[in-house]
Image (tube, rainbow, N blue to C red):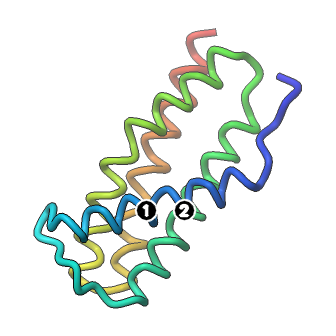
């Protein structure tokens, strides 16, 4: 594929996770509450940026449209798992957001990359 994703995708993914985490905290899903410290939101944004960088990395390695779509589908599937990890990590502490929010997203997107690549 000729069109490689730009770094703005990482910012978009980071803002997406920030908005979703705010909604989770607002509605009290998964035991979260609306009185989350501001530092946790900063760490959610940073973890979302790292997730976006991982998404850019895998999207940049694609050669076909099918593998590109497989990675995007895997990213959509990975968002709830990463969001759950960020919420649980936020209850443990601010650095728990990194340890529980980034690995599920990168792992599932990596699986999408390898499935899309093997399909070709």
Q: Could you say which is closer to the camera, residue 39 or residue 98?
A: 39
Residue 43 left/right relative to 4? left
Report the residue at 62% width, 55% height from top. 12
Taking the view exactly as shown, the residue that stands out farthest to the top is 120
Residue 106 left/right relative to 35? right
Instruction: Name the residue carrying label 2.
Output: 15
Q: Is residue 76 above or below residue 7?
A: above
Q: Is residue 24 above or below residue 114?
A: below
Instruction: Name the residue carrying label 1.
Output: 19
Whole-percent x, y for residue 79 in the image: 39, 47
Looking at the image, do the residues carrying marks 2 and 1 touch, with CB atoms under 8 Å apart? Answer: yes
Report the residue at 50% width, 56% height from top. 16
Name the image quarter holding residue 30: bottom left
Q: Is residue 36 above or below residue 12?
A: below
Whole-percent x, y for residue 95 in the image: 39, 83
| Quadrant of the snapshot with the N terminus | top right
């Amino acid at each position: 594929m000729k069109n490689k994703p730009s770094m703005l995708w990482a910012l978009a993914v980071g803002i997406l996770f920030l908005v979703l985490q705010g909604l989770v905290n607002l509605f009290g899903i998964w035991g979260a509450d609306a009185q989350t410290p501001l530092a946790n939101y900063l760490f959610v944004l940073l973890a979302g940026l790292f997730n976006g960088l991982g998404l850019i990395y895998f999207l940049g390695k694609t050669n076909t449209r099918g593998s590109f779509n497989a990675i995007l589908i895997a990213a959509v599937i990975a968002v709830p798992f990463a969001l759950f990890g960020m919420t649980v990590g936020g209850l443990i502490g601010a650095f728990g957001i990194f340890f529980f929010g980034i690995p599920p997203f990168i792992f599932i997107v990596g699986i999408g990359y390898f499935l899309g690549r093997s399909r070709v």
